[in-house]
Image (tube, rainbow, N blue to C red):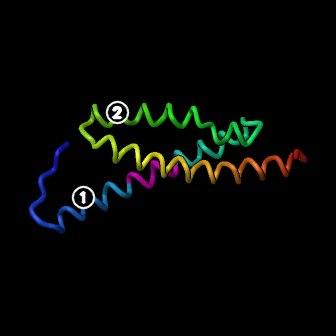
Amino acid sequence: MEVTCNSLNDVRENIDRIDRAIVALLAERGNFVTQAASFKKTTDEVKAPNRVEQVIAKVTALAQEQGANPKVVASVYRAMISAFIEAELKEHALLNEHAGKP
């Protein structure tokens, strides 16, 4: 869906609309990341560098299909994944602490 804006205010309103959707999707993704922590035994499994690269390759291909800038998408995803890994590591540590594991 392509929207043509007639003013900077129109642009900003559309960006705000998209930001609301992105934040909702980030919350949903974060919920799954939190759940994933319970299935992983080690911090290495949380960090999962091979999985990170799989995701980057997948979203870069999706970016090309959708007409998005692949470099921007890869950069955004790397930052997002890094933040989620940090959150997942904290969740993983809490789960292990409550389970009495080292």
Circle number at residue 14: 1
Q: Is residue 83 above or below residue 50?
A: below
Tag 1 or tag 2, which sits nearer the N-term? 1
Question: Which contiguous range is marked in magenta?
Answer: 21-27
Q: Is 7 left or right of 30, judged from the image as shown?
A: left
Q: Is residue 21 above or below residue 65?
A: below
Q: Which amino acid does label 2 sit on?
A: Leu
- Secondary structure category for the residue under label 1: helix
Contact between labelled residues 1 and 2, with CB atoms less than 8 Å apart: no
Asked where in the image residue 15 lies, by quadrant, the reply is bottom left
Between tags 2 and 1, which lies in front?
Answer: 2
List the single residue furthest toward the bottom.
9
> Which residue is outermost to the left?
6
User: What residue lies at 32% left-to-right and 37% top-to-bottom?
Assistant: 63
Q: Position of residue 36 (x, y in %)?
A: 65, 39
Which quarter of the picture shows residue 51?
A: top right
Which residue is at 49% across, 50% downward?
80
Q: Few, some or many C-alpha atoms within 10 Å of disc 2 (few <14, some 14-19, many ≥20)?
A: some
* Mark pair 2, 1: CA separation: 22 Å
Residue where numbered disc 2 is placed = 62
**How many residues crowd around disc 1 within 10 Å: few (fewer than 14), some, or many (20 or more)?**
some
Image coordinates for residue 25, horizontal then vertical, percent: 45, 48
Amino acid under disc 1: Asn
Q: What element carries label 2?
A: helix
**Image-based side of 56 in relation to 2, left or right:** right
Q: In which quarter of the image is the N terminus?
A: top left
Q: Is 24 covered by the magenta stretch?
A: yes
Left or right: 99 as drawn, with respect to 26: right
Mark identifier at residue 59: none
